[in-house]
Image (spheres, helix red, strand yellow):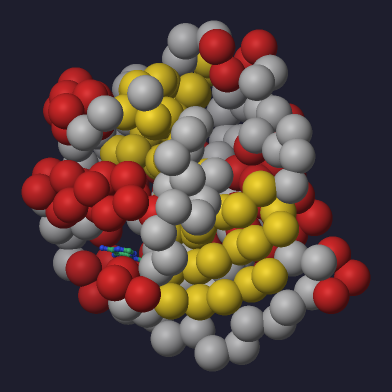
């Protein structure tokens, strides 16, 4: 794996993970795709995020309990199988090299849901070297107002206003359904992960001057 991942709490490009395209590019440049892998996009919504990774995967399976996704286009030219699941029980076992959650953890109800997610993830990952990448773990310092402000600055700077609007719409729809943002201390997440046999690594701090949002990599020990 590329050396970049081994750096602790790397101050990434401030907004590298504030947008699905940048998040996907961050994964590519961090060296996640040395060969084609089987990816589970947990909380995939409309696959906005993992569609950027099609060329690097032989399988992209999406799971979302709240979103009805009907139109899975299988991309023959890239030989990437795309499927959607709405029931966790239907996810295949021992299949994935990597499970990614992009802007999903904050919609969990509480820490017990994180624990049950890690338990199911353990079954779905291949036995060796399975990884979980959680993009946007929000800690109790996370401040939505400040975040929206920097999001807007970023969108103007990078000329990605359209995707900002789409992200805002998505956030509004999901927040409407979930009513609150779940925040978790990294120490608590680390303890849950260690108890279930995962090694915990901070990959980057994604936003803001204080410790607000992080990307966390969990690797099967
Ligand atoms: C902000 S959207 C992100 C969608 C997608 N990951 C992306 O990057 O475009 C959050 C998604 O998490 C899903 N979600 C919410 N609670 C969830 C849960 N407990 N388990 C799995 N997915 C969940 C929502 O249905 C929604 O599609």
Q: Nearer the viewer, residue 67 or 40?
A: 40
Could you tell me residue 95's position as x and y percent? 50, 55
Q: Is residue 99 visible?
A: no
Residue shown at the point (60%, 44%) measured from the top left: 23
Identified at 71% across, 82% down, the residue is: 73
Q: Residue at x 24, y 75 (%)?
A: 177
- Residue 99 position within the rendered picture, expressed as x and y whole percent measured from the top left: 47, 49
Q: In this picture, is 137 found above or below 182?
A: above
Residue 85 seen in this snapshot: yes
Image-based side of 56 in relation to 96, left or right? right
Judging depth in this view, the residue of 133 and 182 nearest the camera is 133
Quadrant position of residue 91:
bottom left
Query: Residue 77 at what x, y percent from top left?
Result: 89, 70
User: In the image, 221: left or right of 163?
Assistant: left
* Number of marks in the rendered image: 0
Judged left or right of residue 196, residue 154 is right
* Quarter of the image where one finds residue 134: top left
* Front residue of this view, candidates 198 and 15: 198
Quick check: which quadrant has ligand 1? bottom left
Q: Quadrant of the C terminus?
A: top left
Q: Is residue 193 above or below residue 21?
A: above
Q: Is residue 63 above or below residue 160?
A: below
């Amino acid at each position: 794996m590329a050396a970049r991942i081994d750096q602790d709490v790397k101050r990434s490009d401030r907004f590298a993970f504030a947008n699905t395209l940048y998040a996907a590019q961050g994964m590519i440049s961090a060296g996640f795709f040395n060969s084609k892998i089987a990816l589970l996009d947990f909380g995939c919504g409309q696959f906005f995020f993992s569609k950027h990774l099609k060329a690097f995967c032989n399988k992209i399976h999406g799971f979302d309990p709240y979103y009805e996704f009907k139109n899975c286009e299988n991309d023959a030219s890239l030989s990437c199988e795309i499927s959607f699941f709405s029931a966790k029980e239907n996810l295949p076992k021992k299949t994935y090299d990597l499970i990614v959650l992009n802007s999903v953890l904050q919609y969990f109800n509480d820490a017990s849901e994180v624990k049950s997610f890690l338990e199911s993830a353990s079954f779905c990952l291949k036995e060796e070297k399975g990884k979980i990448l959680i993009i946007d773990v929000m800690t109790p310092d996370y401040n939505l107002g400040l975040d929206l402000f920097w999001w807007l600055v970023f969108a103007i700077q990078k000329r990605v206003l359209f995707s900002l609007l789409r992200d805002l719409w998505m956030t509004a729809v999901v927040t409407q359904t979930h009513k609150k943002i779940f925040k978790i201390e990294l120490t608590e997440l680390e303890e849950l992960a260690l108890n279930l046999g995962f090694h915990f690594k901070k990959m980057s701090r994604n936003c803001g001057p204080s410790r607000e949002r992080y990307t966390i990599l969990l690797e099967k020990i």
